Every structure is written in C-alpha cells, then in structure tokens.
Image (cartoon, rainbow, N blue to C red):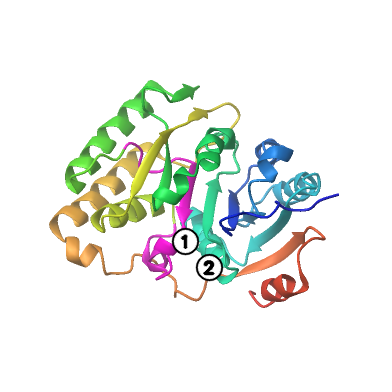
Amino acid sequence: MRIGPGPNPRGERILVFVPMYNCAPQIPRALQQFDVATQSLVDEILVVDNRSQDNGVAAAQQALANLRHVRTTLVRNVENYGLGGSHKVAFNYALDHGYDYVIVLHGDDQARVADLVPYLRGGAHRECDQLLGARFGQQSRLVGYSRLRTWGNHVFNGLFSLACGRWLADLGSGLNMYAMSALRDRDYLRYADDLTFNYYAILTAAAGQARLRFVPISWREEDQRSNVKMTRQALRMCGILAQFVFSRRRFLTRSFSLRAPDSYRYEPVWESASASRHERSLAGTAV
C-alpha cells in the first residue's frame, strides 16, 4: 500500500496543520475529510493538541491511524500556548522539516478542506503568499452562524480593509494556506499567542504587500463550542487596529508575545509508521 503522495513534478512539499483544543467530538470528523484523493495531494498531516482537557488526543490518534495514504503525526504542546502559539509550533515544524506550504484546517470541523482542493489542484497556491478562506462572500456558505456575528465580521472586515488600503475579505477563518517562503524570517513569533494571532498576521502581511488571495468557503456551526467572547474580542480588535493605524512602524516591529521565541515546544504523541528515522529524531529533540 502506498504511503504519501506520488512524485510531484514541481518538487513541492505540503503540510496540513490541524490545531485542536477540547474538540474530541469534532476532531474525527475533521480528519475524516481527508479521503484517499485528498491525502494524495499532501505530504503530512500534523495535529497539534494545545493541552486539551477532554479525550481529544485519543480521538485524534484513532482517526489519524485510519489515514493510510499519507504520513500523519500527533503532538501535544508542552504548555497551553493558545491558538496562535499552536500556529507557531506548526510553522516552526514546517520550516524545520523543509515544507514549502502549510494548509491550516481547524480541528473543530467548521471548515471543509474540499473547498480548497480545486485551488490546490489548479496551482493557485503557487501564485500567492497566502490563500485564505473567506466565509462572508457571495459564493461562500454559512450554516448555523448568527446574523449578529456575521454583521460584526462584515464591519471589522471593512475597518481593517480601510486601514490597510486593500480589501480583506476575512480576518481569520479556519481554512488557510501559507507559502513558507514568505515566513522564513519567522516574524510570526512576535504575534500574540491567543485568538488574535490572525489579526496581527494579516495586518503585517497586508502592510508588507504580501500576495493575498481570498477564496469562498463553507462554514458551519453545529456542536462546536466557540472560545470567542464577542464583546471582549471586539474591544481587542479595536485596540489592535488602533495600534496599526497610529503606530504602524512600532506595530510592525515590536513583539506582542509573552513568551521567548524559542519557547514553543511540543511532545511527540503518535506518528504513522511511514515517518523516517531522521524525522522521528527531529521530533524527539523538540521537547
């Protein structure tokens, strides 16, 4: 049985990063999205557990074991680093292991990786630095998402776009793809570790004239539990935007992280038998 994708004529390597926190019911569904055809498009699926307090790790391991056509890896953060901190763990992993692209699919099963597949097959990811899922466009599809939250997202999308001077269709969905060539300086290590990580990332990318492309995706809320407190999040977004508008130079250079850049460490939990001895050695030294 073949493990991993066949020869890629362009020689590119793609990592799928699945962040997970207390989503034991949803993580198997998120990973089941990777049918054989989708598995063949990527080189590795990395699940990063952010110290979940449910049985999500066991659920993820069992689901990963069923994916037999791609390399799979499950790690656990040494501490709770927040969603942004998990991104830092995954981006570091990708750069350390020589990956060219990272697909981010949140483990709470709100987004569908199938929405990205046509763009991946067509090579759209090679023409931009970030291929970003947009939940609120005319071709996007929302299921179970409140009108109040939809309206709030439209408002902040507009405000952030005005500040940047370019249209930002979504400030941070759970389905995105990044070219690691644009992240080699690891500037992401200075962004905040919490749910605001994506706001710092997209403002910095827009200010640096990064090539951003937004594509419509479907998004649903069923049994997911949001960690976003709307009022507090809105106030934080206003604060971030104000810093960007009134102190842009400082915004683009200062660190918003409370941790040292080398403190984002993980513990290996499980990996498919296809992982090489060299990769296992790298994972073992990450703690």
Inspect the magenta stretch and tell me whether residue 1 lies in it.
Answer: no
Asked whether the beta carbons under mark 2 and mark 1 sit within 8 Å of each other, the answer is yes
Which residue range is magenta in the image? 169-193
* Residue count near mark 2 (Cα–Cα under 10 Å), binned few <14, some 14–19, many ≥20: some
**Looking at the picture, which amino acid does disc 2 mark?**
Leu
Height in image: 185 above or below 223?
below
Residue identified by numbered label 2 = 95
Which quarter of the picture shows residue 80? bottom right
* Residue count near mark 1 (Cα–Cα under 10 Å), binned few <14, some 14–19, many ≥20: many
Residue drawn where x is 76% and y is 64% of the image? 275
Height in image: 67 above or below 256?
above
Give the SS element for disc 1.
helix
**Looking at the picture, which amino acid does disc 1 mark?**
Met
**For this rendering, which residue is in front, 34 or 85?**
34
Taking the image as shown, residue 61 lies to the left or right of residue 246, namely right
Residue drawn where x is 21% and y is 55% of the image? 244
Mark identifier at residue 180: 1
Marked residue nearer the N-terminal end (2 or 1): 2
Horizontal and vertical percent for residue 83?
A: 50, 53
Residue at the far left: name it: 246
